[in-house]
């Protein structure tokens, strides 16, 4: 498995976990989280298209950073922490698109 394939899996798992946490949030929390999550999903879709092109663009450092972000997602329980980790994920993806 190449690094781009690994990145698709790692990032996909992270995005799904964020979406699940969003769905488990209260209605008022969802209203706060939704704009950031929508931005993340748009950037994620664009990044997925880049990862499908020929050649490998993901580095080992990229994978390490994504795993670090995923760990933060796993630990985020409150809305404030979720907003921070969504912003961090958006920033990570933005550097790749």
Image: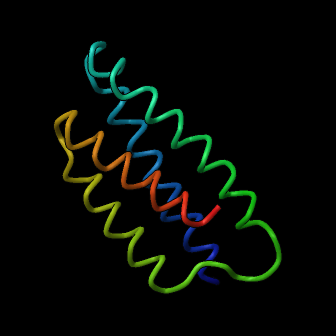
Foreground of the two, 93 or 76 = 93
Q: Is residue 10 above or below residue 40?
A: below
Q: Please tell me in which quadrant of the rendered image residue 28 appears.
A: top left
Q: Is residue 1 above or below residue 83?
A: below
Q: Please tell me in which quadrant of the rendered image residue 21 appears.
A: top left
Q: Indicate the position of residue 32 as horizontal and vertical percent values.
A: 33, 23
Q: 75 left or right of 15?
A: left
Q: Indicate the position of residue 43 as horizontal and vertical percent values.
A: 60, 48
Name, please, the residue furthest toward the top.
27
Q: Please tell me in which quadrant of the rendered image residue 34 appears.
A: top left
Name, please, the residue furthest toward the right.
54
Q: 75 left or right of 52?
A: left
Q: Is residue 2 above or below residue 11?
A: below
Q: Quadrant of the C terminus?
A: bottom right
Q: Which residue occupies 48% across, 65% down?
A: 10
Q: Which residue occupies 26% across, 53% down?
A: 74
Q: Indicate the position of residue 65 as horizontal and vertical percent values.
A: 39, 73
Q: Quadrant of the N terminus?
A: bottom right
Q: Indicate the position of residue 48 as horizontal and vertical percent values.
A: 68, 57
Report the colour scheme.
rainbow
Q: Which residue occupies 59% across, 66% down?
A: 96
Q: 85 left or right of 48?
A: left
Q: Which residue occupies 31% across, 69% down?
A: 68
């Amino acid at each position: 498995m190449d690094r781009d394939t690994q990145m698709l899996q790692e990032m996909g798992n992270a995005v799904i976990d964020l979406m699940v946490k969003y769905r488990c949030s209260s209605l008022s929390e969802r209203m706060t989280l939704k704009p950031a999550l929508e931005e993340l999903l748009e950037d994620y879709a664009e990044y997925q298209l880049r990862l499908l092109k020929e050649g490998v663009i993901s580095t080992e450092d990229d994978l390490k950073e994504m795993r670090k972000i995923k760990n933060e997602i796993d630990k985020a329980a409150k809305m404030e922490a979720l907003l921070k980790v969504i912003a961090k994920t958006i920033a990570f993806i933005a550097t790749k698109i």
